[in-house]
Amino acid sequence: MIICRILGYLLAIIAVAAVGYEAWQAVGNGGWKIITLGELWFTLDAQSLSVSQAGIQRYVAPWLWEPVITTILLWPGWAVFGVPALLLMWVGRKRSKRGRFGG
């Protein structure tokens, strides 16, 4: 369960960084705009985004990129990392040694 917690914390750090990037962009641009995962990926490394698309469409499954991955790339970046982070931290939480009813 410690692996779930560690992965959850790492994803939470990435989610907080994505929100921080949105805030930084809001200050610079004068207005808040939700930044999608695709925009974040393109900002970090546009070439890897193109290579991933070509590789998935050519070697994995062409249908996987268009309806599935493009939908995920259009979601807010903080949500894509934040929701799994919360789930992993919840699954990997330390449980009390007592019984369910405190006895």
Image (cartoon, rainbow, N blue to C red):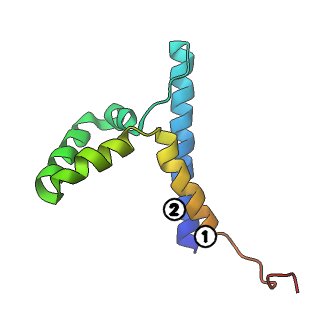
Type of residue at label 2?
Answer: Leu
Quadrant assignment, res 98: bottom right
Q: Position of residue 46 (x, y in %)?
A: 26, 34
Could you tell me which secondary element the residue under label 2 belongs to?
helix
> Is the residue 52 above or below the residue 100 in the image?
above
What residue would you read off at disc 1?
92
User: In what quadrant of the picture does the C terminus appear?
Assistant: bottom right
Q: Position of residue 95 (x, y in %)?
A: 72, 76
Is 45 left, or right, of 98 in this rendering?
A: left
> Is the residue 66 above or below the residue 40 in the image?
below
Q: Is residue 76 visible?
A: yes
Q: Position of residue 68 (x, y in %)?
A: 31, 50
Decide which of tag 1 and tag 2 comes sooner along the chain: 2
What residue would you read off at disc 2?
7
Q: Residue at x 12, y 57 (%)?
A: 59
Q: Residue at x 61, y 62 (%)?
A: 89
The total number of labels drawn is 2
Q: Label 2 near label 1: C-beta < 8 Å?
A: yes
Could you tell me which secondary element the residue under label 1 belongs to?
loop
Q: Is residue 10 visible?
A: no
Quadrant assignment, res 26: top right
Q: Position of residue 92 (x, y in %)?
A: 60, 70
* Disc ID at residue 9: none
Q: Residue at x 15, y 46 (%)?
A: 54
Query: How far apart are the two marked residues, 1 and 2, measured between alpha carbons?
Result: 9 Å
